[in-house]
Structure formats: structure tokens, C-alpha cells
Amino acid sequence: MEEMEEELKCPVCGSFYREPIILPCSHNLCQACARNILVQTPESESPQSRRASGSGVSDYDYLDLDKMSLYSEADSGYGSYGGFASAPTTPCQRSPNGVRVFPPAMPPPATHLSPALAPVPRNSCITCPQCHRSLILDDRGLRGFPKNRVLEGVIDRYQQSKAAALKCQLCEKAPKEATVMCEQCDVFYCDPCRLRCHPPRGPLAKHRLVPPAQGRVSRRLSPRKVSTCTDHELENHSMYCVQCKMPVCYQCLEEGKHSSHEVKALGAMWKLHKSQLSQALNGLSDRAKEAKEFLVQLRNMVQQIQENSVEFEACLVAQCDALIDALNRRKAQLLARVNKEHEHKLKVVRDQISHCTVKLRQTTGLMEYCLEVIKENDPSGFLQISDALIRRVHLTEDQWGKGTLTPRMTTDFDLSLDNSPLLQSIHQLDFVQMKASSPVPATPILQLEECCTHNNSATLSWKQPPLSTVPAEGYILELDDGSGGQFREVYVGKETMCTVDGLHFNSTYNARVKAFNKTGVSPYSKTLVLQTSEAPHPHPTRPWLDTDSEEQTLPFPVPSERLPLRRMSPFSSTLNLQPSFPGRSYFDFRSSPHQLSLHSSLQSLNAPGCNFEPQSAPYSQLVDIKKLLAVAWFAFDPGSAHSDIIFSNDNLTVTCSSYDDRVVLGKTGFSKGVHYWELTVDRYDNHPDPAFGVARIDVMKDVMLGKDDKAWAITEGGIAKGATIGVLLDLNRKTLTFFINDEQQGPIAFENVEGLLFPAVSLNRNVQVTLHTGLPVPDFYSSRASIA
């Protein structure tokens, strides 16, 4: 009940309502607070003068409301505080709840106990502090507004449950704790307010003052005051005015403005409005439940945001550290290259230094030797060696002149590091896309009540969870192969419903769906189990959702409860049975793997007994209709047929508008089991050549059936109008057999027939045929197959 506390507090004083009154706008105010926010409007600003001057009228027409005075008297002996000396026209304060309020009026001196009230100001008005609607008051004052006794009772129960201290009901601002309660006035007083408004003299001296706790008990035990009519204060409400939407008394109906209005009994309307409020609360309760779940989701999001932030920061630091590590590794590689170049240059220079040093030593030795030779005075001896010395000197000189004195290596390093692309990349380093608040859409929910099967097709429906905040861009529906194999995608798109055709008869399929968006795909939904025709479930149940299992069972076509008979195809959700009697018919199913047993009963009804069981006649004895073999019902498919094909009779009868042969397929494909259907020739002119058989879905539609390798057919020129052609497709034995007028045409026509095959016919405008399905396999073929 703690959340309700704000509903119990006055928007002006911020405390619990004290003697609440109901304004015409349906908001509540304390009676004392209503007196404090009264204002007096100049005559020129009154609605009457504005209306007379032709100025705009307020959106809310309260001119029919009573004008109320600024003062009110009560049994407690206190009077309201007087109006404004100069009426303010704009609010200048705010209440504790934040709504705009007018400043409280100063109390007129020495008027608390005056038996005569002050003159009633004209054009007084009150502005609702919540919706800011201005209300024109009449001479009755605040007594013209009904008291909200229900709100008083709720506040009293709430305070008792909280054991809250009782507050004074006369304090203007923050109410003080009450010290006494007057049993006659039924008002709680603090000491200052008791001395001021309830002095122990005069008539008030006979009033009994009790402690607040005792007063609360006595108030709870005393019967609640009955609401009286605001126009006739001595009359209780007895009826409810439908037009004015308010309770009225009998005098209002006889004399007042409600005399010509539609009225209803007060008790009946009380129950009706209670019922309407309860229904509205049910819807609001669902919204509140969703809001609570949403708040839990938001709180979880806060925690998730914290965790994602830490995770993302760690990822960012790791990525930056990886970049730094890579840069350091590259730095080391580049430094190694520089060191290698450094060593190479030093080696070359050192080798040249060594070579030049040796050469210079040899040259110096040669020079010193030649100088010593020149010092010799023996001519003959000098001439003997002079030629050789001259050649050696010239040779040595030539050796120094061939780049020997040029450095083999420069001191500069011929390497330049281009770091501008890397710096630009570092400056451009940024987040490509912000991380999504939720990585993937929520898991879709399969709607079991909308899923169904019909023959060998299945319709599945799903939706997003109600509180999902991540939109889904599309859905992926997956189905297995009917034999427990791997799932494969059968639909990808934005729709939330899909019908899958061409399934195997007598097979069980598993279906699941997932949603996707740019971020990724959601987890799979729970698996749905579908049972196609020819194998009804032995224990039928309605679709159900197993919250503890990852698999849902949806058996078809058997319902689990009695339903009205409808005209639909057999072995879908209902049977195609036409009741031959008026009234209501019901059925239920019981099944085994090889036959169905239909239980039908009849119940007579009359006018008093049309409300089901109470006054209806007993049911008749159950009648069993057994041995309903499971067979396929289908029609021709306009969607895949050639455009020249003309359909009629619910797509069971076809002809053609062209003289050329055109192909039309059945709507149901077969891949296993034994199937038999017949076609009757309704029109046969000028000896055409119709062809009957089976074909794949992509067979050529503008040539005779059987002209390509995707069809198996027979053409019979000897048939006539009224002939019946039977086609028996045994996919268990992979054979195709034909019958004309119940006689088999030779042995097996085709063998090794397999795959997904559709009934097919080719014809031209000279032929019209009608398809008959749901037929049992001929008896002789069934017995022969069982022997084999």
C-alpha cells in the first residue's frame, strides 16, 4: 500500500486529505486548502462579461456550476478565513507536490465564532491545482461540492495500517500532531488550533474532547456518514443520472435540473461501475505487470551496461596494447636494420684504413730506399738498379691514383623512415560502429493457437516477445526432412506466418524459427512437432507450451475437445460432415494408427434451452462411424497452372482456352505412401488427346504432359464423354498404374517413379475434366499389395 500514499495526499498542502471535496473536474482538494486558493475575479473578467463582450470562452464550460462563497461554516465552530483584499490573478507559490497554487488568504480578524457570515463576494472562482481549470462558485460556498467520503475511509484505513500519528485538521501549512478529538465535531485538533477554533466556552463547552487514539477507534466504530445531495442537503442520494453522470436525490428528479434526464437505480449503477472498474483494473494490472518486468529488464540492463563497459574497456586496452606491441616489434626490426648498416659501414671503412695503412707503409719504405740509393756515389752500381726503381715508383704512384684515396663508404645513412601513413592511421583510429545495446533480437515465440496442418501442408505463426526492445529485421524458419534429419531453411523474410506445402503424408516434422538483424541471429525458438495427415495422434491434445522442455508437441488433425462441426477439408482440424438436422452438433475423435473412429451425438434445443446445458434435452446415444481411411483431399492449383487453363467448381473442374495442350497440376504433392484419384471427362469434342499422370513442379506447362523428362503420363484417344480415368501412385513400390472405367490398363505403366510428384493433366479447349479426390485405393490392389 506504500505506492498508494501519493494518491491520498492533497496537491496543495502535500498532506493526507482532510475533509476532501470533489471538484467538477474529478480532482480532490482538502476543504481548508480549497478555501485558501479561492480568488475573487473582477466583474469585467467574469465569464458573463467576457461572453457579453464577445471574447473567447474557456474550453471548459463550468457556467452551469454553482457559484460558491469564500466562506464555509461547520459544526466545529470554526469559520473559513477571509478572501483576498486584492485578488491575485496569477499563482505565486507552489505546493509541496509541485503544482501551482494561489497564496493563502489572511484570516479576517475576530470572525471565527461569528454566527453571521460575511457577505458573499461576487464572481468568486477556484482553480484546480492539478488541471488548472477555473471554476465559478455560487452562494453556497464549498458546500456545493460533494464530500469524498470514500477517500476519507481509504485514508483512515491506510493510516490505521501504518499506525501513523494523527495530524491536526485545521493547521494551514504543515499540520501538527493532533492532541485531542472532538466527538461532536469529528475533528482532530492540535493545541494551538483547539485554543483558537474550539475554545471551552459557549456551546462548545459541552463538547467532549478525547485523545486522538480513542477518537480514531470511535470514528472507525461509528457508521460512515452518508453522502447527501449538494442541492438538497437533507436528502440522500437515491438514483443515478446517466446524462450528468452523478448521483441525485428524488427532489432533483422532481424539481431540479435532472427531471428530464435518464436515471437508473443507484445500487445497480454502483455494481455496474464496480464491475467496469474491476475490468479496467485487470487491464491496468497487466500493464503494471509488464512495467514491473520492464523495470527488472532495465535494472538488468544497468548491470549489463556496467559489465559491458568493463569488458569493452578491457578489449580497447588490449587492442591498443597490441598496437603498441606491434609498433615496438617493428621498432626493434628497424633498429636491427640500422645496426646492420652501421656495422657494414664500419667494416668497409676499417678495411680501407687497413689497406691504405699497408700501402702507405710500403710507399714510405720505397721512398726511403730510393733516397738512400740516390746518396750512393757509384755510377755503375746506380745504373744497374735505377731503371727498376723508376718503374716501381711510377707503378706505386699509379696505384694511389686509381681511387685509392677516395672513401669507399659515406658517413651518411641512406635510410629514411616514412611514418606519415602510420601517424595518419593513428589519428584516424576510431570506433567504426557503436556496440549495440543488445547483440541479437529476442527469441521468437511460436503461436500454437494459430499453427495448423492441412493434408501435407503446414502453417506456422510466430511473434516477438512483448517486452522485446531490439527490433528484428527478419525471420528464418527451419524444418527437418520428416525423418529426423538435419534442419534446412524453408523461409527467410519479414513475415510472421508461413505455409509450407509439399510435405510428406504420414510424417512428423520438427519446426523452429529464429530472428535476425544486422548484429546477428537470435537463439532458436522451442521446437514445434507437426504431424501431417494419415497418422492421427493416438492421444489427441490441444497445442501446449512446455516451459521445461525444448520441444512442443502439436498433433494434428485431432482436437481434444468437442467443437462445432464446420465445413472444411477432412483430416485438417475438423471433419467435412454436413449435419442433416437443425440444431447443434458436436463431435470428438478417437484414433489408432490405422483408422479413425468418429463419435457423433445429437441434442435437441428450444428457445429456453439455447444456452447449452441447463435447459437442453439430453444427448442421444453416441453413434460410431469407423473405418475412415486416411486419404488425401486436394484440388487443382491455379498458381502453378498455365495461364490458358480455366478453373471452376472450387478448382476441381478445368478446361482450356487454347487449342494447344496446356498442363495443370494438383495442389498437393506426394513423396511417400499410396494415393489414388480419378478424373471424369465432362466434355470431349473433336477427338482431342488429353494426358493424365504425375509430374514434378517444374514440368513444362505449354506442351503435352510427358513430352519432357519431368512427367509420367498416359494419353488415351479412345475415351469418350463420361469416362473415368483413375490414377494410382504407389510411392512405396515406386510404380504408377492407370484405370479407365474401373478397369486397369495393362500392367504397371511406369516403374522407379520417385521424388515429390504432383497429380497432372494436359488438355486443350476441346476437353473438360473434373477431379475426384479422397478416394480409397481399389480393394484388389490393396489386397495384392498386402500379399506382396
Image (spheres, helix red, strand yellow):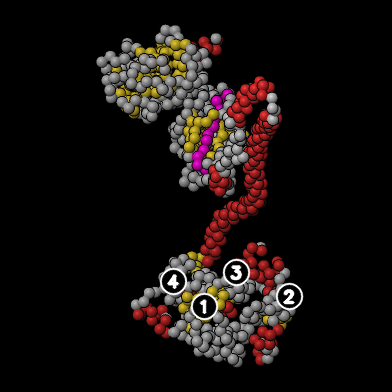
Q: Which mark is residue 213?
A: 2
- Residue type of the residue flagged with mark 2: Ala
Q: Nearer the viewer, residue 238 or 221?
A: 221
Could you tell me residue 661's position as x and y percent?
A: 31, 19
Q: Residue furthest top?
A: 746
- Residue type of the residue flagged with mark 1: Pro
Q: Earlier in the sequence, mark 1 or mark 4?
A: 4
Question: Of helix, strand and loop, which one carries label 4?
Answer: loop
Q: Which residue is mark 4?
A: 60
Specify start and end residues of the magenta stretch as a single range: 472-484
Q: Nearer the viewer, residue 246 or 712?
A: 712
Q: Is residue 510 left or right of residue 638?
A: right
- Residue type of the residue flagged with mark 3: Val
Above or below, 565 against 788 in this view is below
- Residue type of the residue flagged with mark 4: Tyr
Q: Is residue 160 left or right of residue 591?
A: right
